[in-house]
Amino acid sequence: MAAAGSSGRWVDDFSAGVVKAIGAVEVLAAAGLLLPAVLGIAPVLVSLAALGLVMLMLGTAVTRFRRHDRAHCQAHNGGEPSLRCSHPST
């Protein structure tokens, strides 16, 4: 994960199995968003997949706040408090 810089160090807090599970959930959510529309079946799955992605992103936000990644974002936005990083690496 060295290529990802400091924004990729969150994986140090989780086991390899958890990181793989997160990846699998993201792939399944993407399939849940696309396949029902493409195949025309079970449109309720789109809503459930979207809800799952919202929950995943909330978990991501909690992890970033706990790791104090906000300071990294602040440093790249001219010292202004921000949740958005203008430069994700370094």
Image (spheres, helix red, strand yellow):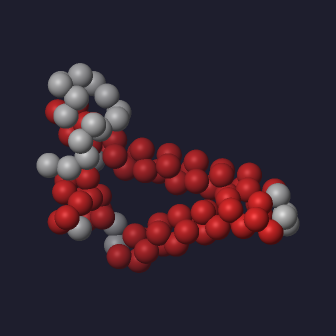
Q: From this viewpoint, which residue is outermost toward the bottom?
A: 17
Q: Percent position (x, y) of residue 35?
A: 72, 67
What residue appears at the point 17 percent right and 66 percent down from the top-left corner?
2
What residue appears at the point 55 percent right and 69 percent down from the top-left corner?
27
Q: Percent position (x, y) of residue 81?
A: 27, 24
Asked whether residue 82 is in view, the answer is yes
Residue 34 lies left or right of residue 87; in this view the side is: right
Q: Percent position (x, y) of residue 83?
A: 35, 33
Residue 27 lies left or right of residue 90; in this view the side is: right
Quadrant of the image occupied by residue 85: top left
Q: From this viewpoint, which residue is outermost toward the left?
A: 90
Image quarter hosting the N terminus:
bottom left
Q: From this viewpoint, which residue is outermost toward the front?
A: 38
Image vertical order of residue 5 relative to residue 64, above or below: below
Residue 12 lies left or right of residue 29; in this view the side is: left
Q: From this viewpoint, which residue is outermost toward the top?
A: 80
Image vertical order of residue 19 relative to residue 81, above or below: below
Quadrant of the image occupied by residue 43: bottom right
What residue appears at the point 61 percent right and 69 percent down from the top-left corner?
28
Asked whether residue 68 is in view, the answer is no
How many marks are shown on the rendered structure? 0
Residue 70 lies left or right of residue 56; in this view the side is: left
Image vertical order of residue 51 relative to residue 78, above or below: below
What residue appears at the point 50 percent right and 49 percent down from the top-left corner?
57
Image vertical order of residue 37 relative to residue 20, above or below: above
Q: Percent position (x, y) of residue 46?
A: 73, 56
Question: In front: 61, or 44?
Answer: 44
